[in-house]
Amino acid sequence: MFLLIVFVISLTFSGFGVAQAEGDNDGGDDTEIPTDEPIAIELLKIREVILRASSFNQLKSLSLPVYVQADVRGEDMVVVVENYEGPLEVEIYGLSGSGSVGEVYSVSGSGVYGLDISQLTAGYYRIELHLGMTTYAGKFSIK
């Protein structure tokens, strides 16, 4: 219950962080930002189903916290996953109908996975990472 309250409060004040994939609109210096510089996406856990462990080995594997990170790096989305074993489904879709991409990977402990987003046009996008019965989501923009 406490986590639900914290989640609702964080949504109220943060409104899902939005990262800009390219560009600088602050009106200041027009120095180019390298496109290979990673732009982190704030991910929020939006769904989690916890199952009871039926053996010591399952309990041991459930005790490590899963780490998930997503970055825009030029024309690629890079997803890092640690302490997880199973399918990883990555879905990216435009919030204004401006395109979508997706891919499914098999994670064995940890890994770094790349997804080509070069065909996506300028606009706002939502990313969802489905790890078994847990879903993480975030927003980003492409200029």
Image (cartoon, rainbow, N blue to C red):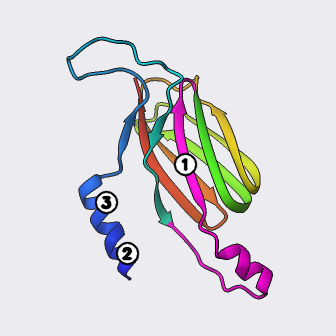
Helix or strand or loop: what does disc 2 sit on?
helix
Instruction: Point out the stretch of residues depicted in magenta.
Output: 47-75
- What's the residue type where badge 3 is placed? Leu
Taking the spot 62% from the left edge, 47% from the top edge, the residue there is 80
- Left of 45 or right of it: where is 105? right
Q: Which of the two discs, 3 and 1, labels the residue nearer the N terminus?
A: 3
* Picture coordinates of residue 83, whole percent (x, y): 68, 62
Q: Which of the two discs, 3 and 2, labels the residue nearer the N terminus?
A: 2
Indicate which label's residue lies in the foreground, 1 or 2. 1
Quick one: 19 or 91, which is closer to the camera? 19
Q: With respect to residue 82, does 124 lie above or below? A: above
- What's the residue type where badge 1 is placed? Gln
Q: With respect to residue 77, does 43 lie above or below? A: below
- Left of 72 or right of it: where is 42? left
* Picture coordinates of residue 78, whole percent (x, y): 60, 38
Read off the residue under disc 3: 11
Per the rendering, the mark at residue 4 is: 2
* Picture coordinates of residue 116, whole percent (x, y): 64, 29
Read off the residue under disc 1: 69
* Picture coordinates of residue 16, whole percent (x, y): 35, 51
Taking the spot 66% from the left edge, 51% from the top edge, the residue there is 89
